Image (cartoon, helix red, strand yellow):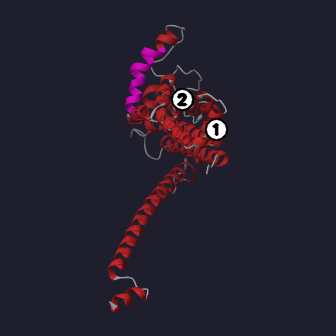
Amino acid sequence: MTSQRNSVGDGSVPQTLTGRVTLGRLKEQAVKAVFFCCALLSIGTTIGIIYVLVTEAVVGVGDSQAFFQEVSLVEFFTETRWTPQFADKHFGILPLLTGTLMIAGIAACIGLPVGLASAIYLSEYASPRVRNLVKPVLEVLAGIPTVVYGYFALVFVTPYVLRPIFQDGLGLDVGVFNAASAGIVVGIMIIPMVSSLSEDALRSVPQGLREAAYALGSTKLDVSLRVVLPAAFSGVIASFLLAIARAVGETMAVTIAAGQTPDLTLNPFRSVESMTAFIVNVSLGDTAVGSIVYKSLYAVALTLFVITLAMNILSQAVLRRFREVYQ
């Protein structure tokens, strides 16, 4: 008994407890190291992408000149023709930029309102049973391959939706490949992102705000649109910006549905080419490595990277500026 009291009373830890503490700490350190490596891998990947884009588009490798050493920035951002694969080469990115933004704009007009309305319904109106049923079905849209969306636009949206309404009804010429059908399917694609992120923001609003509004005689609609939605403004706007960035960077659906005609136009029923579609076209393997056409791929990719990066930075700034912290 005396030896046991001394072993506990002198502040020493029994050997078995010491072993458990040491094993627990080792596990914590191992998990911490794994998480750190994952974070480091993502940072390293981003740095690698930036290095490749900047090297090929701006700096150059060895004796090989970069794209912007052969084509001026003025021509790249002001020229209205994009014909790098023609004999008469022109490198104006405006047709690609216009096509990309037009498709993203159409997608935003469809995906943002529908996604926000879905989020408000799931957060404020739906019962738990209905929410548990509807939300997984809605998020199934995010798991459908983008190639399927592209062919869906090509074989259904254009012939059975756009042409009966705009060509047969209004007399407008709707091409087989067009920006409108691409924008519609991309808008459908971003609905789950907007809905999920916006619903999380809406559900994070304290219940006390809702109850206070109900106590003042507000209706469900008033509470949803005038209390809950403004309180979750930062999260909703951030979801909008992230969804638009997703629409800007969409590749296969746009490549299939919108076509590959770099035409500077604002007519959504004509064939256009986005920046991502051009990257796919050049990456097929028919372009000689080191040629100016090959280098233009990296210039377009760098422009797309800067656009999406700017939108992500803007979304983070909106979150910091308008974020509401509730105790």
Of 67 and 184, nearer the camera is 184
Image: magenta residue range? 145-162
- In this orientation, does residue 121 appear? yes
Residue at 52% x, 28% y is 114
Position of 218 relative to 41 (above/below): above
Find disc 2 in the rendering and name its residue. 117
Task: Where is residue 57? Give x, y as percent.
Answer: 55, 48
Find disc 1 in the rendering and name its residue. 212
Task: Where is residue 234? Give x, y as percent.
Answer: 62, 42
User: Which quarter shows the N terminus?
Assistant: bottom left
What residue occupies the far bottom of the structure in this picture?
Answer: 2
Residue at 56% x, 39% y is 202
Residue at 52% x, 50% y is 53
Q: Amino acid at mark 1?
A: Ala
What residue occupies the far front of the structure in this picture?
Answer: 1
Locate residue 5: give its quadrant: bottom left
Give yes or no for residue 157 being in the magenta stretch: yes
Task: Where is residue 69? Give x, y as percent.
Answer: 59, 48
Q: Amino acid at mark 2?
A: Ala
Q: Give SS at disc 2.
A: helix
Mark 1 Cα-neighbour bin, 10 Å: few <14, some 14–19, many ≥20? few
Give yes or no for residue 317 being in the magenta stretch: no
Mark 2 Cα-neighbour bin, 10 Å: few <14, some 14–19, many ≥20? some
